């Protein structure tokens, strides 16, 4: 699926920058910069919304099928869930672990969109990023169980944590590459 470069480029560029900056905030937070925890939380929500904006922009291509609409729906639900995760942690409704499971579930749905739309010369990178992001689906049982303590969480919930490599590194890298292209393609 391809769209107008002028429409895709700014969204893809913003997505890539926000994704990598959010990752950097998380690293610095764990290195002791506590104030960047909230910045990371907000960055998650912004990245989710930008992911939907990217999906919508790429969906504007001429060939719209029921499959394309279903994938766009997955991205939309995913974006909402990323915001839910941010709201849960920022309002102290849950701790960071359960909120992170919600956000990784949302990004997993966005990963499904990416798996279903990646094509052209960036296809392989999109498929890899999307596949890694879908590991967030492994955290759904943890959400249903209300698991919110990192120290007592079952080991299988940590597998969902690997999805963040797709969300914070691979997907933003893919979108930066997309922004650089003369003719964008998903």
Image: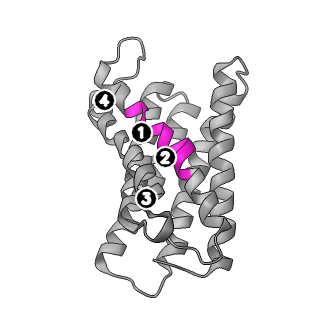
Task: Report the residue marked by disc 2.
Answer: 82
Q: In the image shown, does 133 or 45 lie closer to the viewer?
A: 133
**Magenta span contains residue 101:** no
Task: Report the residue marked by disc 4.
Answer: 142
Task: Report the residue marked by disc 1.
Answer: 102
Assign the N terminus to one quadrant of the image.
Answer: bottom left
Q: CA distance from mark 2 to mark 3?
A: 25 Å
Q: Marks 2 and 1: in contact by CB < 8 Å? A: yes
Secondary structure mainly formed by the magenta segment: helix
Q: CA distance from mark 2 to mark 4?
A: 16 Å
Residue stretch rendered in magenta on the structure: 160-171
Please tell me whether residue 76 is drawn above or below residue 150 in the rendered image.
Answer: below
Residue closest to the far bottom: 62
Q: Look at discs 2 and 3 and give the one toward the viewer.
A: 3
Report crowding for label 3: few under 14, some 14 to 19, many 20 or more residues within 10 A (C-alpha): some
Which callout, 2 or 4, points at the residue further toward the start of the chain? Answer: 2
Which callout, 1 or 3, points at the residue further toward the start of the chain? Answer: 1
Which callout, 1 or 4, points at the residue further toward the start of the chain? Answer: 1
Which callout, 4 or 3, points at the residue further toward the start of the chain? Answer: 3
């Amino acid at each position: 699926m391809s769209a107008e470069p002028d429409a895709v480029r700014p969204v893809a560029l913003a997505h890539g920058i926000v994704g990598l900056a959010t990752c950097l905030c998380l690293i610095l937070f764990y290195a002791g910069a506590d104030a960047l925890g909230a910045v990371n939380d907000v960055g998650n929500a912004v990245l989710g919304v930008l992911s939907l904006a990217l999906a919508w922009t790429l969906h504007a291509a001429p060939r719209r099928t029921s499959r394309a609409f279903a994938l766009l729906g997955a991205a939309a639900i995913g974006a909402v869930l990323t915001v839910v995760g941010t709201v849960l942690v920022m309002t102290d409704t849950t701790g960071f672990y359960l909120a992170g499971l919600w956000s990784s579930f949302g990004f997993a749905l966005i990963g499904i969109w990416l798996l279903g739309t990646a094509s052209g010369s960036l296809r392989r990178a999109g498929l890899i990023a999307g596949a890694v992001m879908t590991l967030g689906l492994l955290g759904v049982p943890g959400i249903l169980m209300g698991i919110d303590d990192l120290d007592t969480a079952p080991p299988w919930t940590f597998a969902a944590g690997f999805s963040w490599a797709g969300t914070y590194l691979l997907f933003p890298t893919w979108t930066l590459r997309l922004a650089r292209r003369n003719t964008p393609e998903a």
